[in-house]
Image (cartoon, rainbow, N blue to C red):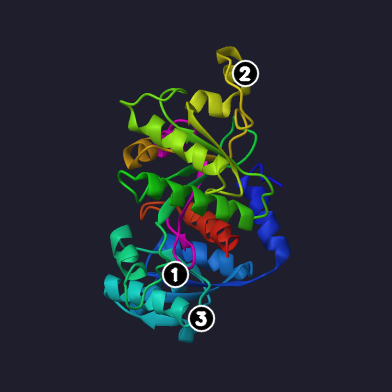
Amino acid sequence: MVYTSIDELIEKVRSEQKTKRLAVAAAADEHVLEAVIRATDEKIIEPYLIGDKEKILSILTKLGGNIDDDRIIDSPDVDDAAAKAVKLVVEGKADFLMKGLLNTSNMLKAVLNRECGLRTGYTLSHISINEAPNYKKLFIVTDAGINIDPSLENKRDIINNAVSALRTMGYDKVNVAVLAALEKVNPKIKSTVDAAELKAMNERGEISGCIVEGPISMDLAMDAEAARIKGFESEVVGDADIFVVPDLDCGNILNKGFRFFAKHKQVGIVLGAKVPIALTSRGATAESKYLSIVVTSAMV
């Protein structure tokens, strides 16, 4: 199965009627709480709100939200709020996390704490799920938020994280395009060398549950006709589910270009920890944060 839109995925989550428990770190933010209230009213989540309790209650009153008092945990310090959110997961009281009004680095510091965090031994990575008006299905861009200059081993984990997420969502077949500026290996261009090795890893069974193609340029990955004209044959052309970028700069620029110029709907999630983390920009809209909650709940 594949999803053609975020709305389609949301309807699938709603129809399953499986309420998930969410811990929100630094929850004293109007857009965050608006999203949480909506997802709670729809019975998608049961939230724990960790942050400045006085501010949280004030915002809830303003928005008309009704969250039980015992699910609001006072913690004005953002680092402490993140640690307490992680602790709820460790204790089995929450199924996944959400970043509220704090920096990503503060959130990940708690997640990666060696003594009481959520490490798995694998690389953490960020995925951006995109709904594009000119592409036939949802697709993932990774990594656009965490790994600055990922090694070959990091890229292997980045692929595995994204593939695992789609498998959890019900995908039977996952196509991975490892992007570069051209389709041939050039020893002077590291992205092409890494892409070819990742494809070889896939062929050897070291990366499983998907088909990996690379190096491949963006136009061929998205457009089968462009691939035909260039004489490039692959199962992935025009049908990619995951686009693996060479580095954070490339992913960040690509994602923002998609959002601002192409008007993509986007959902940001961090994978590779023991649970997924709904992660959006602090300046994101309530709608974007709601979408992030719902889509992340589908990966639990």
In this picture, is 253 found above or below 98?
Answer: above
Q: How far apart are marks 3 and 2 (CA)?
A: 49 Å
Say few, some or many: other residues with alpha carbon within 10 Å of mark 1 (under 14 / 14 to 19 / 20 or more).
few
Where residue 231 sits: x, y (%)?
A: 58, 15
Residue 194 in which image quadrant: top left
Question: Nearer the observer, disc 2 or disc 1?
Answer: 2
The outermost residue toward the bottom is: 70
Tell which circle, 2 or 1, labels the residue nearer the N-terminal end. 1
Tell which circle, 3 or 1, labels the residue nearer the N-terminal end. 1
Residue 218 in sight here: yes
In this picture, is 283 found above or below 73?
Answer: above
Where residue 268 sits: x, y (%)?
A: 46, 51
Q: Is residue 93 rendered magenta in the image?
A: no
- Residue annotated with mark 1: 62
Q: What residue type is labelled 2?
A: Glu
In this picture, is 122 found above or below 184?
Answer: below
Residue 57 in sight here: no
Relative side of 291 to 29, left or right: right
Task: Depth check: give the residue in front, 98 or 206.
Answer: 206
- Residue annotated with mark 2: 225
Q: What residue type is labelled 1?
A: Lys
Quadrant containing the C terminus is bottom right
- Residue annotated with mark 3: 92
Identify the magenta region.
254-279
Say few, some or many: other residues with alpha carbon within 10 Å of mark 3 (under 14 / 14 to 19 / 20 or more).
few
Question: Nearer the observer, disc 3 or disc 1?
Answer: 3
